Image (cartoon, helix red, strand yellow):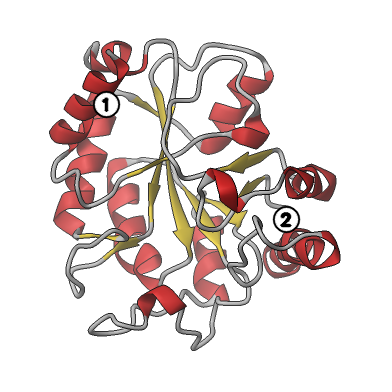
Amino acid sequence: MVASNLHRLLLGGGGLVLTFHRVSDDLPEDGLTRSSRNFERFCRFFRTNFDVVSLSEIVNRLERREALAGAVAITFDDGYLDNYEVAAPILQSLGLPATFFVVTQYMGSDTVAWWDRDLPRQPGWMTWDQVRELSRAGFDIGAHTRTHVDLGKVNGTAAREEIAGARADLVARLGRAPEHFAYPYGQRNHMLDANRELVKEAGFRSCVSCYGGVATCGADPFSLRRMPAARWYRTPEQFTFEQLIRRW
């Protein structure tokens, strides 16, 4: 039950897909990291003021050309260990759904992503057993390529290997096909139109970005915008206020 009309002011008839990466108290908050306290504060705020649903429900409504009516979906990118250890327990305690987009060849590996090399400690990746446990707990697992390649630069056979290959990895590891795909880096220039067609060809139902914006009735599920919950939004109230200002 939505407890306020805030969602109507902010989103109109639209919906919002939020992106997180890390939820950790062992690293300083930065563009990819939220503390457990701040993450829980965001979750409680959205549970109270919006209609938190799964990403699949967002896509269902888009496919039926229904209004999203203040719906919010929570997603994570990359597959960090703290997603399992910290974020998932918070989500479960609040009864909230989420989608975890994983880089399949990073899971269970010692790979250090280039953007993490200067961190004071390495956050680590989930193991496949942990990914399977999230799936069994009812969380959705999506694909985020095999190696976090820039799909704005790679095309053809190499892109197909990253897209369809990641889907095949998840089928093999989880015993079920993922429905949703998130392209790495997430800006407009990081996804070629030809690669978006490969996402459709592979059998996904959606393809999400990470450059902001509201999902509106009739939007293309394969060009679905997501809003990063980045560090410059210190509180959910600030986040909401700035979105209202932008909308007006």
Residue 221, x across and y down, in percent: 64, 31
Look at the numbered disc 2 and give the secondary structure of its residue: loop
Left or right, 111 with reference to 204: left
Question: Looking at the image, is 96 positioned above or below residue 113?
Answer: above
Instruction: Determine which quarter of the picture holds residue 89.
Output: bottom left
Q: Residue at x 32, y 58 (%)?
A: 87
Q: Nearer the viewer, residue 93 or 222?
A: 222
Q: Residue at x 33, y 48 (%)?
A: 91
Residue furthest bottom in the image: 110
Q: Residue at x 77, y 59 (%)?
A: 155
* 2 or 1: tag closer to the N-terminus: 2
Left or right, 169 with reference to 61: right
Q: Residues within 10 Å of mark 2 (few under 14, many from 20)?
A: few
Residue 112, x across and y down, in percent: 45, 83
Q: Which mark is residue 243?
A: 1
Locate the N terminus and report the quarter of the image it occupies: top left
Residue 152, x across and y down, in percent: 64, 55
Instruction: Determine which quarter of the picture holds residue 156.
Output: bottom right
Q: Which residue is mark 2?
A: 176
Locate the C terminus and report the quarter of the image it occupies: top left
Left or right, 230 with reference to 111: left
- Name the kind of residue labelled 1 in the image: Gln
Residue 240, x across and y down, in percent: 22, 28
Instruction: Determine which quarter of the picture holds residue 57.
Output: top right
Q: Which mark is residue 134?
A: none
